[in-house]
Image (cartoon, rainbow, N blue to C red):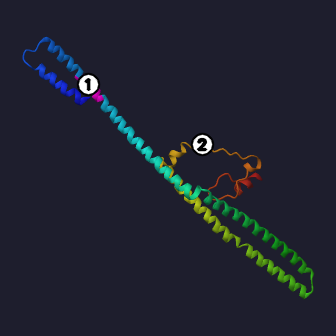
């Protein structure tokens, strides 16, 4: 529009500058000047709108880039952690930990019970041969307890695999949080934490680790009896 208007304005100004300009020509000149002012004002408006559109495009490009990066992180998690195979491994490892712990505990308890019975019988028997048999049985049960305690090594290896997977997921979730402004920006959208447990389950928090809250200390318990 600017390129179309300016040549016409130059032609009109040339005619207005010619000798013998009449009153009608002056009127036309005033009208053209007014139109030029309006055209310039319109151009300034267009320039301002274009500047705003450029700023909006920059912001949209940033959002588009953040969405693209987040999609890539989710794809990595889905391909390496959230698909059925990987999560099945995690569940299998945790299930093996629980099963192995229960089996070892049962073996230890049975061995301890047998040792107790053999020790009681040993104190009542005076025959050297029977005492020797009971002593050998006690030794076998002790060895059985040591063998059962080996479960902790396998348990540690299995839990380490699970922790590696969880750490991988945590790292990529942290990257996605950084993409959208970091932890503080995410906290603004975090829903309130509601404990849906009822009855005794609401009172049980499991073994306490360093930094945990919601556990009573020994001092708190002692204070109840003061």
Which is closer to the viewer, label 2 or label 1? 1
Q: Which residues are magenta?
A: 36-44
> Residue 60: where, in percent of width, then height?
42, 41
Q: Which residue is more in the foreground, 216 or 188?
A: 188
Residue toward you, 17 or 192: 17
How far separated are the C-alphas under marks 2 and 1? Answer: 54 Å
Question: How dense is the environment of label 2, judged by Cα within 10 Å: few (below 14), some, or many (20 and up)?
Answer: few
Left or right of 52: which side holds 220? Answer: right
- Quarter of the image with the N terminus is top left
**The quadrant where residue 133 appears:** bottom right
Which residue position holds label 2? Answer: 191
Dominant secondary structure of the residues highlighted in magenta in the image: helix
| Residue drawn at 44 percent across, 44 percent down | 63
Q: Is residue 54 above or below residue 170?
A: above
Mark nearer the N terminus (2 vs 1): 1
Q: Residue at x 14, y 15 (%)?
A: 25
Q: Residue at x 82, y 79 (%)?
A: 138
Where disc 1 sits, the SS reads: helix
* Residue positioned 51% across, 46% down in the render: 184
Please provide percent x and percent y for residue 103. 76, 68
Residue 34: say if magenta: no
Residue nearest the observer in this picture, 39 or 168: 39
- In this view, 181 is above or below 87: above
Classify mark 2: helix, strand or loop: loop
Image quadrant in which you'd find residue 29: top left
Residue with the mark numbered 1: 39
Label for residue 142? none
């Amino acid at each position: 529009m600017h390129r179309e208007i300016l040549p016409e304005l130059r032609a009109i100004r040339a005619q207005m500058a010619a000798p013998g300009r009449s009153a009608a020509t002056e009127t036309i000149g005033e009208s053209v000047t007014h139109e030029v002012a309006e055209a310039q004002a319109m151009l300034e408006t267009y320039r301002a709108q274009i500047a705003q559109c450029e700023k909006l495009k920059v912001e949209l490009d940033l959002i588009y880039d953040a969405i693209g990066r987040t999609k890539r992180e989710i794809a990595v998690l889905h391909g390496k952690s959230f698909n059925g195979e990987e999560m099945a491994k995690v569940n299998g490892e945790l299930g093996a930990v629980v099963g192995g712990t229960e089996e070892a505990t049962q073996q230890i308890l049975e061995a301890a019970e047998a040792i107790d019975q053999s020790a009681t019988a040993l104190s009542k028997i005076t025959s050297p041969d029977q005492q020797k048999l009971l002593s050998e049985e006690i030794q076998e049960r002790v060895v059985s307890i040591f063998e059962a305690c080996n479960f902790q090594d396998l348990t540690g290896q299995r839990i380490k695999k699970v922790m590696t997977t969880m750490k991988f997921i945590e790292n990529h979730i942290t990257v996605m949080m950084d993409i959208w402004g970091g932890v503080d920006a995410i906290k603004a959208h975090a829903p309130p934490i509601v404990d849906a447990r009822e009855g005794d389950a609401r009172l049980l928090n499991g073994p306490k680790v360093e930094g945990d809250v919601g556990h009573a200390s020994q001092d708190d318990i002692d204070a109840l009896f003061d």
